[in-house]
Each structure stands twice: as C-alpha cells, then as structure tokens.
Amino acid sequence: MPGITLDAVLRRDRIIITASLAAITLLAWFYLLSLTDMMATSETPMESMDGMADMPGMAEAMLTPRAWRLGEVFLVFTMWSVMMVGMMLPSAAPMILLYARVGRHAADQGAPFAATGVFGSGYVAAWFLFSLAVTLGQWLLERALLLTPMMESASGLFSGVLLLFAGVYQWTPLKHACLSKCRAPLAFIQSEGGFRREPWGAFNMGLRHGLYCVGCCWPLMALLFVGGVMNILWIAGLAILVLAEKVMPGGQRLGQAAGAIFVAAGLWVIGRGLF
C-alpha cells in the first residue's frame, strides 16, 4: 500500500469497526423503540396485538400468561437477543478494537488472525445464550403470575427481592472478578495466553469474554423485570450503568454505589409491601 502508513491503516480500521458497532447498536435500539412505540400507542392488549399484526405471535407471547407456541418462543428470544446486543455491545467495543489492532499488526507480520467479526460473534453468542435462559425465565415467571401482561413485575415482594439481590451482587467477589476481566481487556488477553489466530480459537475467546460479561451483568439485566422489559428509559439507564462501570475510571466504585441504592430500594419496596 504505497503512501499509506500502518498507523493510517490502523486508524481506518478503528473507524470502520467503530462505525460498524455503532450501526449495529443503533439498529438494535431502533428495534426496541419500535416495539415500545407499538405498545405505548395501544390502549388495550387487543389493540397492541392489532398494532403488531405484522409480527405474528409476538403480541400473544408478551400479552397473555399462557403456554407459548414454538414461534412465540423464538420471537421473545429474538426480542431479548436484540435488547442484549443494544445494551452490551458498546461496552465490548474496547475489547473488539484491541483485537482488531493486534490483528492488524499480526497481518503486517505475515501471520493474520481470524477476522474481527469472528471474535465479536463469540462475544454476542454469550449474550444469545443468556437470552435463551432469560426467555425460559420469563415463561416461568408468567406461569407463576409474577409478571403482568406488559412484562413488568406483578409483585412488590418479587420486585424487592430482585432489587436486593442485584444490589448485594454488586459487592460480591464474583462480580469483582468478572468486572475486572471486562475493565482490563489487555489483562484478560494475557490471562488467556494471548489471542488465537484460528477462527474457532478467536470465536471461543470472544465467547469466554462474553461469558465474563454475562457473569458481571446478569443480575442487572434481571432488573428489567422490575422497571419493565419494554420501559425504554429503564433499559437505557441500565445500559448506561453497565457501560460506566466498565469503562469509566472508578467504575467499580460506581457499580457498588448503584448496588447500595438497589439494596435500599429493595428493602423499601419489601417493607412497603409488608407494612
């Protein structure tokens, strides 16, 4: 590439990858906003179903506490998967950009890595697995009548327990161990013995990083049932918290402060229900 320096190529790669991550994230949020708008403009569950006629099965899966058909399970799983991509992909950007940068240096030395997309797909796959688990969880909660037709907690006690659990988890050693892997991409790579060049190895490393991220954040995702799975402001607030505790200086302390607030809120909600 005459006249083009390696640094220039690296900058171009960073721009392309950053733009790609931003585009995927924006598409995910557009999908969530469209679902939220359909539900917000409907006065009754039946109207919500009419407004979502172009998405057969989704309205029934979300608005009726009954056994789901296979197609409905797939649509709810899709909703959770897209939501997790929109919420979590921004916080994975430093790790993905690091992989791209090291991969470019390796390619310059004649030993290229698997494509950055392979590594990123591994990360996303971890959240798809989580989405599968939470889809099952939502079905069980609906069967237990702990969720309203609008996918919000139907029990103050249930909400309080979720808040209390998520708050306490923010202070646990497991949370700290998982968060440390997310906050220090280079340390994660070193602990794994370096990047893998072959596609399966790159995918598996991305998957492992994603599983650490799931271990760090899954109790926070459970709080979506407290504020409402389709409450866009609640979704955005949790996404901002996740991003901040992963990339901001002092992010761990910020997460612990949020945990203390969740504990206080949980105790208040439980106490209000008991007295």
Image (cartoon, rainbow, N blue to C red):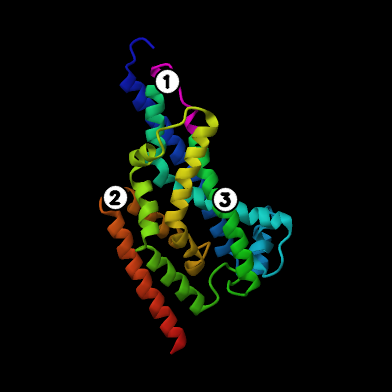
Which image quadrant for residue 193? top left
Majority secondary structure of magenta residues? loop
Q: Residues within 10 Å of mark 1 (few under 14, many from 20)?
A: few
The residue at the point 67 percent across, 70 percent down is 65
Helix, strand or loop at label 2? It is loop
Q: Nearer the viewer, residue 177 or 115?
A: 177
Q: Amino acid at mark 3?
A: Leu
Residue 33 visible in the displayed image: yes
The quadrant of the rendering that contains the N terminus is top left
Q: Residues within 10 Å of mark 2 (few under 14, many from 20)?
A: few
Q: Tell whether label 3 touches label 1 (CB within 8 Å).
A: no
Above or below, 274 relative to 91: below
The part of the chain drawn in magenta is 107-117
Q: Amino acid at mark 2?
A: Met
Check residue 253 for magenta coloring: no
Residue located beneath label 1 in the image: 107
* Residue 129 disc label: 3
The quadrant of the rendering that contains the C terminus is bottom left
Residue located beneath label 2 in the image: 248
The residue at the point 40 percent across, 58 percent down is 174
The residue at the point 55 percent across, 33 percent down is 200
Residue 236 horizontal/vertical position (percent): 42, 57
Helix, strand or loop at label 1? It is helix
Residue 240 horizontal/vertical position (percent): 38, 55
